[in-house]
Image: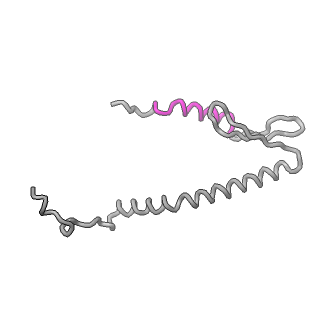
Amino acid sequence: MDIDAINPATVSQPRINEPAQQVTLKRQANQQQAPASSEEESKSQSEELLKQIKAITEDGTYNVSFSRDSNTNRMVVNIIDSKTNKVIRQIPSESALILNKSLSELKGNIVNIVS
């Protein structure tokens, strides 16, 4: 094989019109634009959540408490009746936390990575 026979003029340029390359280019463009939009979306969701919490607790009927679940390390929100100090609602629910812990323990066991 003669290496000198290959020069930039004989090498074909990438074909942009091929579907796979178009998809790759679109993904790259979206990844560059995504951080700004997701950051703004997250901020607006947080502000909306705070407004809803303020509306719930304004009259003093309910209290809201935030904690971290020790088993799953996830944030837990409890809505508590001020008069009885009973939890009215927990987000995520106790069953969702248990499911999350169980799935975390199974992680890596579903796919056999040893060949």
The quadrant in which the N terminus is found is: bottom left
**Majority secondary structure of magenta residues:** helix
Q: Which residues are magenta?
A: 92-109
Residue at 60 percent across and 57 percent down: it is 39
| Residue 87 x, y percent position in the rendering | 79, 36
Residue 5 is left or right of residue 25, and the answer is left
Residue at 81 percent across and 39 percent down: it is 80
| Residue 53 x, y percent position in the rendering | 78, 50
Query: Where is 31 relative to 91, above or below?
Result: below
Q: Residue furthest front?
A: 4
Q: Is residue 108 magenta?
A: yes
Q: Residue furthest bottom?
A: 9
Residue 93 is left or right of residue 20, and the answer is right
Residue 17 is left or right of residue 2, and the answer is right
The quadrant in which the C terminus is found is: top left
Q: Which quadrant holds residue 65?
A: top right
Residue at 86 percent across and 51 percent down: it is 58
Residue at 20 percent across and 69 percent down: it is 9
